[in-house]
Image (spheres, grey):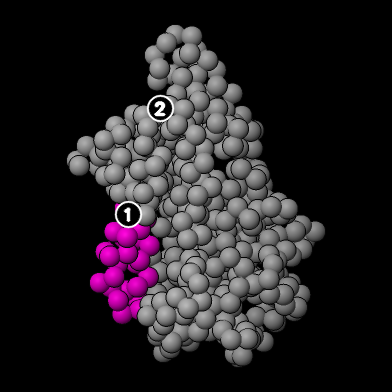
Amino acid sequence: MLKALFYALLFVAPIYCVHFFEIFGKDPYEWLMTILALGSIVVFFLVPTSKKIWFGFFVGLLWFYWVGFSFRYFGAPLLIPVIAVVVACIYMLLFVVSLYSSSYLWRGFWLLILSYIHPFGFDWLVVDSFFAYSYFGVQKYEIAFIVAGVALILQKQDRRQIVGIALLVCAIDYEVFAKRGEKTPFEYALLGSHFSQDFKWQRQNIQTITKEQISSINKAIESGKNLIILPETAFPFEIEKSYFWGILNTLSKDVVLIVGSLREGDGGVYNSAYIFSDSKVSIADKKILAPFGEKIPLPDFLSKKLHRFFLGESPKMLEGKDFSDVEIMGEKLRVLVCYEGTSQEAYKDAPKYFAVISNNAWFEGSIQASVQKMLLKYYAKRFDKTIFHSSNGSRSFVLAP
């Protein structure tokens, strides 16, 4: 069991490297991430078949132990370890299959398809994202070159090792070096915050939160910013019905404001981003809801019961109809809310620039925000996008390809 845990720690090392640097507010070193990501591929090929059950369990636990953290705010903290074990067991089954044979061909095939397997619609198991901060590319053919290259090198035959090294060289993303220092067309401000989730939920704190947000917006405007982005549910109420609606409209006369709030819908609420521009408003309703956190991906007769059990009488979260693109200073910007920013679907036929707003306070004290950042960097790199990410409960940042 301890040996399987050791292998699992080596396999998920890229995630914890990103998390370590995130603690200090920095991006990880590319040379280090390159070594760790290659190490993950090596481990996947070399972990003994006899260790596959515990290896899969520990990988699932180390990667997704935080999934149930939000239940501490629903009065069910005892469910957190239960959910962690259940999630780990689900991923254990996936790794049992992928490590069933010690054949490099079998394991290489699974390395390439794991990112397409989404238990209950949750698509955060993306091994390819380990290379997001590396010198390698993340297009599928480049990942295939890396996997094949490592497999050939591990076979310790001179000719195959030479071919393996050549494949790794072909997988290097030389544009990483060319795009350093790339500028954006916006004078932007990412007004991230660090309100704890229980503080945000107390009605007596709404005035304090809102006044602080308005004050931050005013300071950003005074400093000459023309694009100001606040986090998901920065205003934790239905802002359209509030006194602050008029204030935000007025403030947007010469700037673009993107703020997160809730919006009442038919039979529930939308988790939305409001885009205030030139005293006009457009709305981006969250289209892709987080499995189990915002929707129960099960048949109705089960999902309704589980929603009542887990979320009590809280209103149902509604799904938006489509992604929302807005034009800002001649450039199009796609606005996404949290989880949908880490979904491949959101990047198809999309403009160059993205604004992603999140509330990571739900998972405070975990690696969740670092896993999210690595995925965002992966999609920025894969689809050649620039992402402005404003968050509550974790660091805000801009990610370039």
Q: Seen in the image, is 233 located left or right of residue 329?
A: left
Q: Nearer the viewer, residue 57 or 235?
A: 57
Q: Is residue 283 visible?
A: yes
Which label belongs to residue 2? Answer: none
Look at the magenta stretch and give its main secondary structure: helix
Residue 38: give x, y in percent of width and height: 43, 31
Residue 150 position, x and y percent, is 45, 24
The residue at which mark 2 appears reads as: 103
- Along the horizontal axis of the image, is 253 left or right of 169? right
Residue 302 place in picture, x, y as percent: 44, 75
Please name the residue shown 48% across and 13% down the image.
160
| Front residue (pair 135, 137) | 137
Q: Is residue 70 above or below residue 386?
A: below
Q: Which residue is mark 1?
A: 89
Quadrant in which the C terminus is drawn = top right
- Which one is earlier in the sequence, the residue at label 1 or at label 2? 1
Query: Which residue lies at the image location 69% right of the left edge and 67% below the top edge?
Result: 322
Q: Amino acid at mark 1?
A: Cys
Task: Give yes or no for residue 381 being in the magenta stretch.
Answer: no
Q: Quadrant of residue 350?
A: bottom right
Q: Amino acid at mark 2?
A: Ser
Q: How many marks?
A: 2
Which segment is the magenta one? 61-88
Tell whether 271 sits left or right of 114. right
Q: Is residue 79 magenta?
A: yes
Q: How many C-alpha atoms fall within 10 Å of the one at disc 1: few (<14), some, or many (≥20)? A: many
Mark 2 secondary-structure assignment: loop
